Image (spheres, helix red, strand yellow):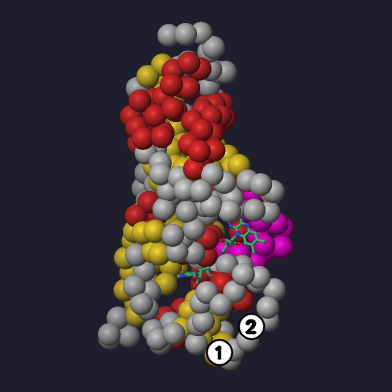
Amino acid sequence: MSNSRVLSYNFDYFQPETLEDALDLIKKKGSRIIAGGSDLLVQMKTGNVEPQALVNILGLKELDFISLNDKGNGKGLEIGAAAQLYKIEENDQIQRNYTALFEAVKCIGSTQIRNMATMAGNICNASPGADTVPPLIVFGAEVVIRSLTGQGGIAERRVAVEDFCTGPGTTVLAEGEMVTAIVIPPMSQGSGSAFKKLSRVTLDLAKISCALCLERQGEICTSVRVAIGAAAPTVIRARLVEEALTGEKITKKFLSESAGLVTGNILPITDIRSTSQYRNQVAPVLIADTFEQAWQKSGGNAISCYYL
Ligand SMILES: Cc1cc2nc3c(=O)[nH]c(=O)nc-3n(C[C@H](O)[C@H](O)[C@H](O)COP(=O)(O)OP(=O)(O)OC[C@H]3O[C@@H](n4cnc5c(N)ncnc54)[C@H](O)[C@@H]3O)c2cc1C
């Protein structure tokens, strides 16, 4: 259905100035959080959702931050739910240390979209093709969720990004809960990461995507995490590939054989963007390419062509 319609019904609109006020407003039945609106307004125009009230969190200064998060074992990152994607793209620390996230954010939509949209919105929309989810999963990131308690205080719980989406468009969020930040652990020495996405045109969601984060000692891959987007109902870890590569000396042949195991983890469908056959065939190649890029980022030499 076309999304060019104007919004054809009435709804309330709130622009709270504090987190407490925002949490109070989202408790009301039929209300919905809006951040950049780049997913929600499309869904409202196509009539897929009809909120009775919109609560805009983009102006909440306390949620508009990117900060170092010192947990005693090095500095990780905390990114507030109202920080737009362009701020993540421009952040030096993210460009240097969290390459897969930087690469994923950089390829989302257009400059106009990244000026408005948020990473929290990307995660909460729960598309299996959401670009920031694979890198956040391979970094072991957590979502910070807050809600009002019965006594008027604020309760907090944390959920791994990997467990946050439960299916296309669904998450673990309960009524009255809001994502307030995403916390990313520190990267260790000798690690490297990369993100790759195949799409019809640059403005489009992924046909399939891959984020990968690895640690290396010489030619041995000591640990690796691989997440695949748009190839299952949620972004999914390629655990068979991870197990095959961990602790092994990496050659091109071994990498290619190990990457082929991904078909045992993914369950792609045919939809408007691609076919299940294409997704199954291209997934191993995408993983091998992303691995090589992450390997180089970790300081590794070009991967040997010789057979084991
Ligand atoms: C032209 C175009 C191109 C696009 N290209 C891409 C692309 O290449 N890759 C990609 O991944 N996406 C793409 N998108 C989708 C979209 O831009 C992203 O998913 C974006 O990050 C959504 O963020 P937002 O702040 O605009 O979310 P909104 O639209 O404001 O919200 C999305 C959903 O999340 C909920 N929500 C938002 N914030 C919170 C919160 N803090 N707590 C709880 N719930 C919350 C909202 O209620 C809504 O259900 C594109 C969209 C358009 C229109």
| Residue 129 belongs to magenta span | no
Q: In the rendered image of this protein, does residue 117 appear above or below residue 163? A: below
Q: Which sits in the foreground, 247 or 264?
A: 264
State whether label 2 is within 8 Å of ligand 1: no
Depth check, front residue: 231 or 141: 231
Amino acid type of the residue that numbered disc 2 sits on in the rendered structure: Leu
Where is mark 2, residue-wise?
A: 7
Q: Which label is found at residue 65?
A: none
Which residue lies at the image location 44% right of the left edge and 42% below the top edge?
A: 227
- Residue 125 can be seen in this image: yes
Tags 2 and 1 touching, CB below 8 Å: yes
Q: Tell me if residue 144 can be seen.
A: no
Task: Tell me the residue that label 1 is attached to.
Answer: 11
Would you place residue 250 above or below residue 82 in this image? above
Circle 2: element type: loop
List x then y, in percent, for residue 219. 45, 17
Residue 207 point in image, percent of width and height: 57, 46
Residue appearing at x 48%, y 22% in the figure: 256
Taking the image as shown, residue 268 lies to the left or right of residue 91, namely left
* Quadrant in the picture for the C terminus: top left
Determine if the magenta segment contains residue 107.
yes
Q: Which residues are magenta?
A: 106-118
156 vs 293, left or right, is left
| CA distance for labels 2 and 1 | 10 Å
Q: Nearer the viewer, residue 233 or 143?
A: 233
Label 1 environment density (alpha carbons within 10 Å; few <14, some 14–19, many ≥20): few
Amino acid type at mark 1 = Phe
Residue 239 position, x and y percent, is: 35, 36
Whether 163 is drawn above or below 57: the answer is above
Image quarter (top left, top right, bottom left or bottom right) of the N terminus: bottom right
Q: Which residue sits at x=63%, y=86%?
A: 8
